[in-house]
Image: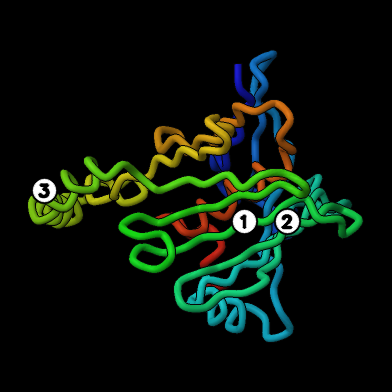
């Protein structure tokens, strides 16, 4: 049985004024031995220019996160920093609490380095490259074929007041399977937005950083708020 990481499986309303300063986003881990448990609280790390500077850099593909051990920011679990972001290719480093390298993650947009699909390359420190592509070619073909119909359905759902689900029907294929040496060590499943760590030797912190990054490039854009 693989370990599983997921981000924000349950969103709680901010009803308690005393908790306004706490980190709201959560990363949950499950190894099958019991219910999922919170292992980190991801939060964007703002540059000197604050939110406007972060959002400006974000448009180029840059990201900067802290994974806190608790909602009150008492201890860092890991940090995600951008090494470079240009031309549709973004390279991130995942660092441990002491600044040690945990791994590197590279995202290449469609029609850039990744070809017809977005490519994610995950490289653990001292380990092999694991390469994954967003969606399957056949499902992308079906999605493009039915996109005009889905757009009409989406418009009517908005006019009707029907709540969407992170893009609803108009959302493209999102499943990612990473391959390395004939194995599939990582798999992101769009149903539930769960990252499965099929290789037990993988550092869960690298997986947690990967979930936060993948979700930041999805329709949710959890780090893209203006406040």
Seen as rendered, the residue at the extreme right is 98
The residue pinned by badge 2 equals: 94
Of labels 2 and 3, the one closer to you: 2
Percent position of residue 22, x then y: 73, 54
Cβ–Cβ below 8 Å for labels 2 and 3?
Answer: no
| Circle 3 Cα neighbour tier, 10 Å, few/some/many (<14 / 14–19 / ≥20) | few
Q: Is residue 1 left or right of residue 78?
A: left
Give the position of the N terminus as an image quadrant. Answer: top right
Percent position of residue 48, x then y: 73, 84
Q: Using the numbered discs, state the Cα–Cα distance from disc 2 to disc 1 in whole angstroms.
A: 8 Å
Q: Is residue 55 left or right of residue 199?
A: left
Give the position of the C terminus as an image quadrant. Answer: bottom right
The residue pinned by badge 3 equals: 146
Seen as rendered, the residue at the extreme bottom is 49
| Circle 1 Cα neighbour tier, 10 Å, few/some/many (<14 / 14–19 / ≥20) | many
Q: Secondary structure at mark 3?
A: helix
Q: Nearer the viewer, residue 112 or 31?
A: 112
| Circle 2 Cα neighbour tier, 10 Å, few/some/many (<14 / 14–19 / ≥20) | many
- 95 versus 87 height, above or below: above
Q: Using the numbered discs, state the Cα–Cα distance from disc 1 to disc 3 in whole angstroms.
A: 32 Å
Cβ–Cβ below 8 Å for labels 2 and 1?
Answer: yes
The residue pinned by badge 1 equals: 105
**Residue in the image at 22% along x and 45% along y:** 169
Q: Secondary structure at mark 1?
A: strand
Q: Nearer the viewer, residue 108 or 54?
A: 108
Q: Secondary structure at mark 2?
A: strand
Cβ–Cβ below 8 Å for labels 1 and 3?
Answer: no
**Residue in the image at 80% along x and 45% along y:** 70
């Amino acid at each position: 049985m693989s370990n599983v990481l997921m981000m924000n499986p349950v969103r709680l309303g901010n009803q308690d004024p005393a908790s306004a300063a706490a980190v709201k986003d959560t990363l949950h881990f499950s190894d099958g031995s019991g219910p999922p448990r919170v292992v980190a609280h991801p939060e964007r790390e703002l540059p000197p220019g604050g939110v406007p500077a972060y959002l400006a850099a974000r448009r180029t593909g840059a990201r900067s996160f802290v994974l806190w051990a608790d909602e009150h920011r008492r201890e860092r679990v890991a940090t995600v920093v951008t090494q470079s972001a240009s031309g549709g290719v973004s390279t991130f480093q995942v660092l441990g609490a002491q600044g040690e390298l945990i791994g590197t993650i590279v995202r290449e947009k469609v029609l850039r380095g990744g070809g017809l699909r977005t490519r994610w390359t995950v490289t653990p420190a001292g380990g092999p490259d694991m390469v994954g592509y967003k969606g399957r070619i056949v499902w992308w073909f079906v999605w493009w074929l039915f996109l005009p119909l889905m757009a009409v359905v989406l418009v009517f759902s908005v006019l009707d007041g029907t709540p969407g689900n992170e893009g609803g029907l108009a959302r493209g294929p999102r499943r990612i399977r990473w391959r390395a040496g004939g194995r599939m060590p990582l798999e992101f499943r769009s149903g539930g937005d769960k990252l499965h760590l099929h290789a037990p030797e993988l550092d869960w912190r690298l997986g947690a950083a990967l979930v936060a990054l993948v979700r930041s490039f999805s329709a949710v854009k959890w780090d893209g708020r203006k406040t």
